[in-house]
Amino acid sequence: MANIMRWATKALRKPPLVPIIFPTGGFETVPPSVVLEEERFKQFKQGQYYPANIGDVLTSRYQVIGKLGFGTTSTVWLARDLEYVTLKIYTLGEDNQEEFQIYKKLNQGSSRHPGHAHIRKALDIFTIFSSCGSHSCLVQKPMWESFRDLLYRNPNHRFTEDLLKSGLMQIFLALDYLHTECKLVHTDIKSDNILQEIEDKSILESFTQAELKSPSPRKIVNGLPIYTSRRFDLPKVFGRAVLSDFGSAVRGDEKRNHDAQPNVYRCPEVMLKTDWSYPVDIWNVGAMVWDLLEGRHLFYGNDPDGKGYSTRAHLAEVMGFLGPPPLDMLQRGKRSHEFFTSDGKWKQDLEIPTGVSLELSEEFLDGKSKEMFIAFMRGMLQWRPEDRKTAKELLQDPWLNS
């Protein structure tokens, strides 16, 4: 019996990774005068990025294949184990423990829930070390481009009605899983954070072959490598929509009223500083839907004083579309007194837009389809969070299912 167990253990053990040998020459050297990708950020000048090189094998397991992107807190790389993965390597000293706890919770919901497959989860989390200190590393399935990228691939910069419906069905499945199974609020839903799964795996191999045949341009700054990011090819088949980036997610069963959400998608309870929870995501999706179908924001919040976004300008726009907020909503808000009198009257020296409505602003639908779409939008854009529909309810919406 012991011999059988030893054989079974050996059979299940992963074979060692045989590294690909990448070219050590033949690449374009970017001139010192050209500021390349993360080099523009102060975090690079402070030596906070991990000096990953194409061909490196991390933790004796993940070989770096090519660079996918960068930001102020991390660089993102395609890598391979026994399958392709992405590695998000965080900058030096970045505190990711709360985010990593969120990723653990994402794996704790029922895998039988249909939204489970529409959430981007962590495959592994580990720490690597550079000469300056430790860097957290998040391993995930590689994804194709985001909804935002899709939007800008279209010459009209907007989704068709059918494409939007298909994507939203999947996002509401993801949100129902997030809200009911994981008890989490995303708080940062935008087209950048909705990705498409890679159904056509050949584009991963094509990425590798492209790096072998035409190595990425790069430069060395103070001994640290910087590579040019490479894009995936256009897939033959598009995969399912996946909600990603949970760095701002919070527990939904705890009271909170801190600032959250992208400015133009900010909901009334965040602006007025009332306690908020799951319904903030619903408002967020509603405002984003307008971007995707109409090709422009529903709310901008640009203050006429010329200083950019302001809460008062945003609230005025919301009132133009939805009318004044309910008094009981204002009574809950810690910032309500800045914008309204005790009896609910607007007290800012800023005019509320007149002659605007969802019906008049929607430009691409007509007839019954437009009527149903406006009703769908009203299910998400309500002053009171408790008046908004849940993700589960929105999955049954007549327009979405038409």
Image: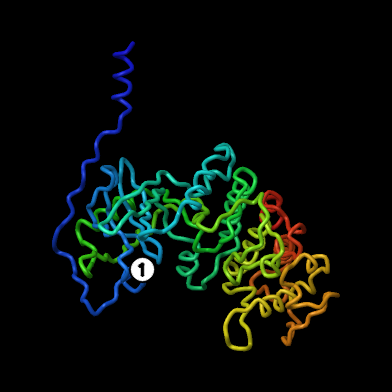
**Rendered position, 271 above or below 21:** below
- Residue that protrudes farthest toward the top in the picture: 1
Residue found at x 60% / y 63%: 161
**Rendered position, 9 above or below 275:** above
Please name whichever residue, 327 or 389, is drawn nearer the observer in this view of the structure.
327
Q: Position of residue 192 (x, y in %)?
A: 49, 63
- Residue that protrudes farthest toward the right in the picture: 343
Residue found at x 83% / y 69%: 327
**Rendered position, 394 above or below 336:** above
Residue found at x 24% / y 80%: 33
Please name whichever residue, 36 or 221, is drawn nearer the observer in this view of the structure.
221
User: Image quadrant of residue 37?
Assistant: bottom left
Amino acid at pointer 1? Gln
For disc 1, the neighbor class at 10 Å (few under 14, some 14 to 19, many from 20) is some
Residue found at x 28% / y 57%: 66
Q: Position of residue 187 (x, y in %)?
A: 59, 59
Q: Quadrant of the N terminus?
A: top left
User: Image quadrant of residue 363?
Assistant: bottom right
Please name whichever residue, 13 or 394, is drawn nearer the observer in this view of the structure.
13
Count of numbered badges drawn on the protein: 1
- Decide if residue 56 is on the left or right side of residue 399: left
Assign a secondary structure to mark 1.
Answer: helix
The figure's colour scheme reads rainbow
Q: Position of residue 307 (x, y in %)?
A: 57, 85
- Residue that protrudes farthest toward the left in the picture: 25
Q: Position of residue 24 (x, y in %)?
A: 14, 58
Quickly name the residue at label 1: 43
Q: Quadrant of the C terminus?
A: bottom right
